[in-house]
Amino acid sequence: MTRTLARPRSTLLCVIAAWLAFYASFTLFTPALLDDADSVHVEVAREMLMRESGVTLYANGIRYLEKAPLLYWSMAASMRVAETLGLHSPRALVAFARLPLALTVLALALLAEAFARRLFRRVYAGLYAALILLSSFGIFIFTRITIPDAMVCLWLAMALYFFWLLERIALNPQLLDPARHPRAHRHSCYGFAIACALNVLTKGLIGLVFPVAIATIYLLLTRGLKRSLRRIRDFHLARSFTVFLLIAAPWHILAALANPGQGHPEPFRFVTEYIFPFHFGHWIVPLPTDGNVRGWAWFYFMNEHLLRYLNLRVPHDYDTVPLVLFLGLCFVWMMPWSAFLPQTVRWALPVHSAKWRSQLRRHDLPLKQRGQLLLVIWAAFVLFFFSFSTRQEYYVLPALPALAILIAGWLATVQAQRAECESKGLRDPARMPLLILAALGALFTAVTVYLLLHTRQPAPGTDLSDLLSQNPGEYALSFGHFLDLDMRALGMFRVPLVLAACGLLLGPVMALMLRRRKHPHTATLLLSAGAFTFLLAAHLGLRTFAPVLSSAQLAEAIQKQLQPDDVVIIHGEYEAGSTLGFYLERPRSYGRANFASGDGTGPHLRAIAPIGIYEGRSSNLWYGSFFPDAPHIFPSHEDLEGLWSGPHRIFMWQSLTDPPNQLPSGISPVYVIARSGGKEIVSNRPNR
C-alpha cells in the first residue's frame, strides 16, 4: 500500500494567507454593489429573506424565474447570519453577501491543490495550482460580481476530482487498504453525484452535462466503447442517481408547482417560407401577454437553457462575444500563467510521441498521463461547448481550474527535472515564457510612463463620467463600459496603472533572474507575487470606475430624504439602476395581499413599495411581469404625469448617457437632487 502524499502545513498557510489578503478582507467591502447582475442577485437574496421562502426567486416584487437558487440561498443565509449578529447596515450586508463566493474560491483553491498534488505526486504542484487560481485575473475579477460561475468551477472540479479518484482506485488498488476499497469506491461515486446535483442547483443543466460529457469522452479515449460500458456499470448508477435526485429534484418540483402557467398563452407555430426554389421553415416562439404566460418549467428549461444556447431566448437582452475573442480571453483571464500554456499543452498531450500514441491506441496510458488527458478534455470541452452557443466573457471560467492544475504540474515537473536538463545542456523550458512576459511587461510599462507624462490627475471632485467617451453598443458585455476610457479619463487611474506596471514587469523579470540563479521555486512564488500585485491594481481600478457602474452614491444621497410613502422610479430597465433597490430597501417588505396567488392555491405575498419602472419593461423582470399577481410597477406616461403632480414625492433615476436619457415630456417642475457617474436623481419636490 502506497502512502498518500500529505499537504504540508506551509502550503495550507500560504493559500489561506493569499485568500485572506485578496478575497476575504478589503474586497468584501469595496466597491459598492454595481448595477445590473451584481445588485440584482443580492436583491433577490434580500427579498428571499423578507418572503421567508426560497422556492420562487423574486426581484422588486416580481418573479425572477431564470436562475437556479443555490447562489441566492447561500447569500441569503450569510446575510441572515449578519442580521443575527446585529449587523443591519447595507455595507455589512454586502460584505456578508459576498462571503459565499469568497469561500467558494478558497474551497476551489484547496481542491485544485489536492488534485494537483495527488495527480503529479509533487507537493509544489499542489501549491502552484492553488496560487495560480487565486492570482488569476479571471477568477478574481468575476468574483467581484455576485454571479455563480465561480461555484460552477468548484462543483465541476469536485465532480471530476471524484471521478479521477475512481480511476485511481481502479488502476492502482494498492493505494488503499483492501478493506477500504469498496467503501472508497462507493463514496467517490456518491461524491460525483452530489457535485453534479449542487452544480445543477447553481447553474442549471450544464452542471450535469459538463462532468458527464467530460467523463464519457475520457472513458471512450482511454478504454474504448465496450470497456467503457463495463466500467460505467461499476459506478453504482442506481444509488448515485438516487443521491443526485434527492438533492437536485426537490427544488425543481417545488418551483414548477409554485409557478404554473397562467391564462391561455399562445401556442408555438411552425411557419414555412418559399424562397425559390426552396421552402424554409422555422418555429415562432409567441411572446406572453398580461395574464397569459407559460409557467416556470417552460421558461427555465426551454427558454433559459435550449433557446439561450441557440441564441433564440426571449427577450434578447444580451450580446454574445465573438468566438475568436472568447477563446483569446482564456489567455487574458489566466495571465500571467497563460504564457506557459503552449508548452503545458504539448507536455500534457504529447501527440508527437510515438510511445504515447501507441499507449493511447492500446488504452493502457499510465495513471498520471490519464489524469493529464482528463484535464485537457475538461478544458477543451468547455471551450468547445460554448463555441456553438451564445457567449459571455466569463463563460470560459469553468475551464480555468483544469488549466491551472496542468500549468502547476508542468512547472513542478520542470523544476524537479532541472538537474537532468542541465546535465544534458538543455535550456530551462520556462525561460522563453518568462521572456515573453517580461517583454509584455516592459511594453505595458512604457505605455504607462507615456500616460503618466501626457495625462493629468483631474481636480478633486471630478466625475469620471464627464471624462469618458460613450460606446453604448458595447454595454451588453460584462465590462463594456471600460471601453469608454480615453486619455482624459485615464488620468484618474494613475495609481492602478503604476501598480499594474510593477506587477507585470517586476514579477517576470525577478522570476527570470532567479531561475538563472537556479532558484525555480522562489521564482514561481515571485511571479505569483507579481500577479497578485496586478490584482490589487485591478481592484483599485474597479473601485475608481465603480461610480459609473453603480447607483449606490445616488441612493446614499437621497436616503435621508426618502420617506416611506415616497415613490422611487427608474427611467429605463430595472437593471440600469438596480442598486437603488438594495440600498434604499425597496421593496420595504412583503405583506399579505387580498387575493389568491396566481395558481389559486392560497394568499399571495405582495411587495410593499417596490421601485417603479418607466419605459423599461424588459430584461430580467420582463417574463415575471406577465403573471396576474405581478405588482403594477410599470406606469404609462399618463400614470407618470399623474404621480408627478400628485401628493407624494417622486424620486426618479435617470441616465445622462444611455438611452432613454431624456426626461419624459410633460412633467413639471423637475428638481435635480443628486448627480453621479453619468446618472441623476430628479424629483417633483425640492429637498426638505
Image (cartoon, rainbow, N blue to C red):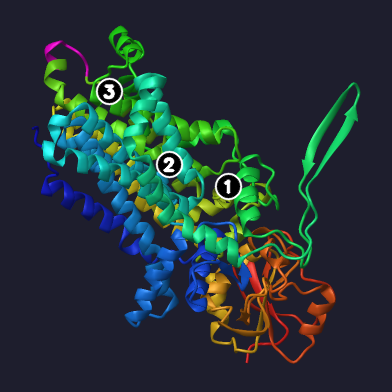
Vertical position of residue 82 compared to residue 65: above or below? below
Tell me what residue is drawn at x 63 percent, y 70 percent: 62
- The label shown at residue 369 is 3
Q: Is disc 1 in contact with disc 3, using a CB cutoff of under 8 Å? A: no
Q: Earlier in the sequence, mark 2 or mark 1?
A: 2
Classify residue 394 as left or right of residue 190: right
Q: Earlier in the sequence, mark 1 or mark 3?
A: 3
- The label shown at residue 384 is none
Classify residue 430 as left or right of residue 314: left
Check the picture and name the quadrant holding the N terminus.
top left
Q: Nearer the viewer, residue 233 or 268?
A: 233
Vertical position of residue 254 compared to residue 592: above or below? above
Residue 452 falls within the magenta-colored stretch = no
Residues rendered magenta in the picture: 422-427
Tell me what residue is drawn at x 20 percent, y 36 percent: 118
Which residue type does callout 2 highlight?
Pro
Which residue type does callout 1 highlight?
Leu
- The label shown at residue 398 is 2
Distance between the alpha carbons at the discs numbered 2 and 1: 25 Å
Distance between the alpha carbons at the discs numbered 1 and 3: 42 Å
Distance between the alpha carbons at the discs numbered 2 and 3: 21 Å
